[in-house]
């Protein structure tokens, strides 16, 4: 089987699993407990926080461990916007884009509906690029946050993070960097907040991070015992934090090699699919894209039917975001890029992992055979 759905999730790395094991056994303490067992857990948590901070270019106190990227995105948007509302007594203005992950779009909609926050949803160009100039044009005196995906989870388009950061000026910039980790630099982007997920980089599902600079007021979404410097209450997942820190370090150390090696494999795969399937269209930016992501539309066939044919041929991929699985609606990302809804429903996304290797020709041949099989029905 060829698993090509790493944008949805990937396996836990053996080194990460090994590092986590003691915290399921003899090092089981609650890091908030004031005794030696708890203090041992707290020391491990502090070490993980320091290591994550070093990779993202922030301070240890800026790292908030969460249950995953969805919680991190919710905390970033709701936490900053509600803190501004509490501070000023006025609902502010939030800027995001029409191609964000559902957790960002749903959080923005909640703020708009419940708290009266004004939301601007920028529409990118046909390749998925949001220009710094377009961002500058919509900023207001009461803008409290800009939230943009560093790299899109469906089509793989990479934004000009530094340019967007320069455009925001004094306004905090949040980057959903879930897909970017291990492929793109996380430090030096100019962002004030980053969301990350462990299961995209070789850590388990159920652990994530919001890295947000301490100077930015943040209202907690989860209230309770005041853990994570009173920004995210709840007993911390020490094993997950330890695994996350190691996975992030390994992904960063291997990033340059993975980017080059997997990028070449992706380009060869894209070229062969376009050669073998004349009706295939690559979505997203042709150059400014993640090294591991290739997404196509196949006009005139059902994307779901193609996926089933691919799996029969030993290739596992997806139609887009795993968080939208089961929906009959066309991808909001592809529609925002100007792709007609009926064509958007033909989309198939292939996402290679950081350790992908080998000749992609066999997978491309399977794609061509699958599309032909569906078309012949």
Image (cartoon, rainbow, N blue to C red):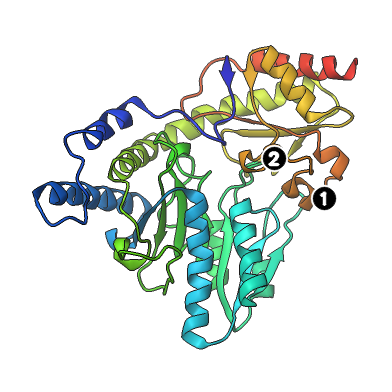
Residue 81 picture location, percent across and down: 53, 73
Q: Nearer the viewer, mark 2 or mark 1?
A: 1
Number of on-image labels:
2
Q: Would you say residue 171 is visible in this rendering?
A: no
Q: Residue at x 23, y 37 (%)?
A: 23
Residue extending farthest front = 224
Q: Residue at x 51, y 29 (%)?
A: 353
Q: Residue at x 53, y 43 (%)?
A: 179
Residue 325 picture location, percent across and down: 67, 38
Residue 307 picture location, percent across and down: 72, 24
Element on which disc 1 rests: loop
Q: Is residue 108 above or below residue 157?
A: below
Spatial CA span between label 2 and label 1:
16 Å
Q: Is residue 155 left or right of residue 205?
A: right
Element on which disc 2 rests: loop
Crowd class of label 1 (few under 14; some 14 to 19; many from 20; radius 10 Å): some
Residue 160 lies in quadrant: bottom right
Residue 163 lies in quadrant: bottom right
Q: Which residue is mark 1?
A: 338
| 2 or 1: tag closer to the N-terminus | 2
Most foreground residue, 158 or 22: 22
Q: Is residue 364 left or right of residue 39?
A: right
Q: Is residue 301 left or right of residue 255?
A: right
Residue 254 lies in quadrant: top left
Most foreground residue, 162 or 101: 101
Most foreground residue, 173 or 3: 3
Most foreground residue, 115 or 340: 115
Residue 127 picture location, percent across and down: 73, 48
Q: Residue at x 20, y 46 (%)?
A: 44
Q: Which residue is mark 2?
A: 286
Quadrant placement of the N terminus: top right
């Amino acid at each position: 089987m060829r698993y090509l759905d790493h944008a949805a999730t990937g396996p836990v790395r053996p080194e990460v699993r090994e590092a986590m094991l003691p915290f399921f056994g003899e090092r089981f303490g609650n890091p908030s407990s004031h005794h030696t067992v708890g203090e041992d857990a707290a020391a491990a948590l502090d070490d993980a926080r320091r290591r994550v901070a070093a990779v993202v270019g922030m301070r240890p106190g800026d790292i908030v461990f969460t249950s995953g990227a969805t919680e991190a995105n919710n905390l970033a948007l709701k936490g900053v916007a509600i803190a501004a509302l509490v501070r000023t007594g006025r609902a502010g203005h939030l800027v995001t884009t029409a191609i964000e992950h559902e957790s960002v779009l749903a959080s923005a909609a909640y703020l708009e509906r419940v708290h009266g926050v004004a939301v601007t949803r920028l529409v990118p160009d046909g390749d998925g690029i949001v220009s710094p100039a377009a961002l500058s044009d919509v900023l207001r005196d009461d803008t409290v946050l800009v939230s943009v995906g560093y790299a899109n989870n469906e089509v793989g388009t990479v934004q000009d993070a530094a340019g967007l950061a320069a455009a925001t000026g004094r306004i905090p910039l949040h980057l959903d960097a879930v897909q970017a980790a291990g492929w793109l630099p996380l430090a030096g982007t100019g962002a004030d907040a980053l969301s990350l997920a462990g299961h995209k980089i070789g850590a388990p599902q159920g652990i994530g991070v919001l890295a947000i600079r301490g100077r930015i007021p943040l209202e907690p979404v989860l209230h309770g015992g005041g853990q994570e410097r009173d920004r995210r209450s709840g007993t911390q997942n020490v094993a997950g934090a330890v695994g996350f820190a190691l996975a992030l370090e390994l992904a960063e150390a291997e990033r340059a090699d993975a980017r080059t090696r997997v990028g070449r494999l992706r380009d060869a795969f894209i070229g062969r699919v376009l050669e073998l399937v004349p009706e295939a269209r690559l979505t997203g930016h042709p150059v400014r894209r993640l090294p591991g992501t290739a997404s196509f539309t196949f006009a005139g066939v059902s994307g779901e039917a193609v996926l089933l044919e691919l799996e029969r041929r030993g290739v596992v991929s997806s139609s887009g975001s795993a968080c939208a699985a089961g929906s009959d609606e066309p991808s909001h990302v592809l529609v925002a890029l100007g792709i007609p809804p009926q064509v958007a429903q033909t989309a198939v996304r292939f996402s290679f992992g950081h350790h992908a290797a080998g000749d992609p020709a066999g997978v491309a041949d399977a794609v061509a055979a699958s599309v032909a099989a569906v078309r012949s029905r």
